[in-house]
Amino acid sequence: MIYLLSVFSSEAQPKSLLHLPLKLTERTSIGARQSVKEAEYYCHVFVRGDSLTGMCFSDHEYPPRVAHTLLIRLLDDFAGQVPPIEWTAGTELVSKFNGQLESYLAKFQDPSKSDATSRLQSDLDETKIILHNTIEAVLQRGEKLDDLVDKSEALSLQSKAFYKTAKKTNSCCGTSWG
């Protein structure tokens, strides 16, 4: 799961969650991205070439690559809609882009639906499970066939023994079996 944390929000946020992104942003070079674990969350930061920075929080199960894809798309859309002069001034611009933040967050909640590689990995995992089940079924069928062959051989031996016994028993009566 991925979370939105607004620095401009009046809601009470844990101090470490507010302090970490600012510190991480300062330590991330232009054009780079980072993911750092803080408590039960990961903080993902991406700094574009024009110094526009995006950050998001996710739980430990959310793939960092998908979080960075979200940040790249979000920052590209933001830079395309809000002139650099406005966002370089350091004023609050969340209201100009807020509706789109929620749509991005909704779209990226499930990594397998928002990212082709995650979707492919999910499909591969499903295929692997099906393949393992199929192989297991084939092996069980092979074991059953081996059991049938063993039983067939035993039945054949019993049938030969019965034939020999019947031949001996009936040899005194004068009937011929073969």
Image (cartoon, rainbow, N blue to C red):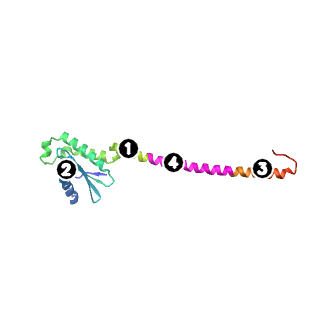
Q: Which residues are magenta?
A: 127-153
Query: Magenta stretch containing residue 137, yes or no?
Result: yes
Amino acid type, callout 3: Tyr
Task: Tell me the quadrant of the picture where the C terminus can be found.
Answer: top right
- Residue 86 appears in view: yes
| Residue 152 percent across, percent down from the top left | 67, 49
Circles 3, 2 touching at the beta carbon (< 8 Å): no
Alpha carbon separation for disc pair 3 and 1: 63 Å
User: Secondary structure under badge 2?
Assistant: loop
Which residue bears the numbered disc 2? Answer: 29
Alpha carbon separation for disc pair 2 and 4: 49 Å
Q: Earlier in the sequence, mark 3 or mark 2?
A: 2
Amino acid type, callout 4: Ile
Q: Earlier in the sequence, mark 3 or mark 1?
A: 1
Q: Residue at x 14, y 42 (%)?
A: 84
Q: Earlier in the sequence, mark 2 or mark 1?
A: 2
As rendered, which of 168 and 107 lies closer to the eye? Answer: 168
Q: Point out which mark residue 163 bears.
A: 3
User: Secondary structure under badge 3?
Assistant: helix
Q: Earlier in the sequence, mark 2 or mark 4?
A: 2
Q: Earlier in the sequence, mark 3 or mark 4?
A: 4
Alpha carbon separation for disc pair 3 and 4: 41 Å
Circles 3, 1 touching at the beta carbon (< 8 Å): no
Principal secondary structure, stretch drawn in magenta: helix
| Residue 154 percent across, percent down from the top left | 69, 52
Q: Point out which mark residue 88 bears.
A: none
